[in-house]
Amino acid sequence: MTSASSPPRKGAGPSGELASLRQAHGIPALPAVPTDPVVSGPVTVASYNVHKCVGTDRRFDPARIAQVIGEIAPDIIAIQEADRRFGRRTGLLDTAALQEAGLTLLPISSLPDGHGWHGNALAVRAGTPLSLQRIALPGAEPRGAVIAELELPAGKLRVIAAHFGLLRRCRTRQGAAILEAIGQGEAMPTLMMGDLNEWRPGRRSSLRVLESFFGPASFGPASFPARLPVFALDRILGWPQGVVQEVRAHDTPLARKASDHLPLKAKLLLNARAPAQAAALPGIQAAA
């Protein structure tokens, strides 16, 4: 006979419900509860499709892109279209200007003069990369994602930088591939940023596949086209609930010229999880 204070059986309660939910939808096992967060102040994060450093005035100007990033002053930024698309994938960013802004590109490219993987680059202000993983995403066109596990002053953080395809069916498969990759790692706060090329909310959205982990992928801030933003193509998502806050477009005169996308920025609170959340179903929590 067990006493009233005995711990519940393994698999009972919300964690068992979450496992059944994942199985029903064909989603791989994902981290259930993150480790206890480190108390810290907010971290500024950003996502920016730099359009190969070609602005709305059709001028190639990497220094201008660096200026916009300097306006944001991010601690972590995911950059899309950081390399040439065809031929040798050489980097297009002004790395010296980024370094002056206090940012260091993570060593993602396999080329000595490349900046990312399928154009996805990551730059951080302070932090040590524990692991870097490059993923070739499925689809009709070459697309990729980067998963970096970082040791920040505030604790561990998983960052996913991605650029999804133009076809809805491909975006759905690409989202599933991201979830599968997350499921192979340990539990830690997780941030996903990038140009996900989806403007539709609700049932027709290709991002619904991500909702089992990141929560409802509702309308985000409009970021495209930069001169008159209408479509929410860019996203910043986080897990667990409350990690990502204050998602907004960085809309300045310079940002409207530097690229055809406006950057997104947000605050990241690694100490956001309340004790009561440990008993919830984190896979269906809203993230942003």
Image (tube, rainbow, N blue to C red):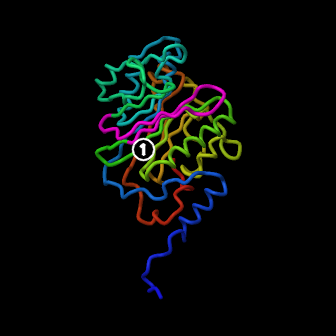
User: Residue 173, percent across and down?
Assistant: 64, 39
Q: Where is residue 150 in the image (x, y as percent from the top left)?
A: 36, 42
Q: Is residue 108 above or below residue 38?
A: above
Q: Give the range drawn in magenta.
A: 125-149
Residue 113 percent across, percent down from the top left: 39, 17
From the image, tell me which residue sits under label 1: 158
Of residues 63 and 228, the one drawn nearer to the viewer in this rendering? 63
Residue at 49% across, 11% down:
59
At label 1, which amino acid type do we have?
Answer: Arg
Q: Which residue is drawn at 37% across and 34% down?
A: 74
Q: Main secondary structure of the magenta part?
A: strand
Queried whether the magenta region covers residue 138, the answer comes back as yes
- Tag 1, which secondary structure? strand
Q: In this view, does 180 lie to the left or right of 276?
A: right
- Is residue 46 magenta-colored? no
Q: In this view, does 271 lie above or below 279?
A: above
Q: In this view, does 269 lie to the left or right of 224?
A: left
Residue 19: quarter of image: bottom right
125 sits to left or right of 238: left
Residue drawn at the location 47% of the way across and 53% of the way down = 240
Q: In which quarter of the image is residue 130?
A: top left
* Residue located farthest toward the top when viewing the structure as drawn: 59
Q: Where does residue 287 sit, x and y in percent of width and height?
A: 51, 50
